[in-house]
Image: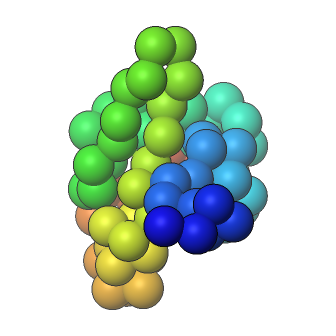
Amino acid sequence: MDKNLKDAYTVKEVTEIMALSRTAGYEFINNNPPFPIKHIGKCIRIPIQPFQAWWNSGDTSPQPPQVN
């Protein structure tokens, strides 16, 4: 495996892709997102392929939380 290729995103990377605030991103990730997440100690990682499949599918449910 190429050490330069990533297999997973951080929550920060996912929130940037989704244009969410940090708080909204963590709330979305911690409330049963429609893709798998991995807890590694205190770290959360989101496998790239399932996230990208969901993101590119246009599926809008569940909606990310609205932060006012």
Give left or right: position of 23 versus 27: right
Can the viewer see residue 50 in this picture? Answer: yes
Q: Residue furthest top?
A: 42
**Residue at 48% across, 40% down:** 45
Task: Indicate whether 27 appears above or below 25.
Answer: above
Q: Which residue is at the front of the view, 67 or 1?
A: 1
Task: Indicate whether 43 appears above or below 33.
Answer: above
**Residue at 44% across, 49% down:** 46
Q: How is the image coloured?
A: rainbow
Q: Quadrant of residue 50?
A: bottom left
Q: Quadrant of residue 37?
A: top left
Q: Which residue is at the front of the view, 30 or 46?
A: 46
**Residue at 35% across, 36% down:** 38
Task: Indicate whether 43 appears above or below 9.
Answer: above
Task: Indicate whether 34 appears above or below 10.
Answer: below
**How many dots with numbers?**
0
> Where is residue 23 drawn, in percent x and y?
66, 30
Can the viewer see residue 18 in this picture? Answer: no
Q: Which residue is at the front of the view, 41 or 17?
A: 41
Q: Residue furthest bottom?
A: 57
> Where is residue 44 drawn, in percent x and y?
49, 31
**Residue at 58% across, 69% down:** 2
Quadrant assignment for the C terminus: top right
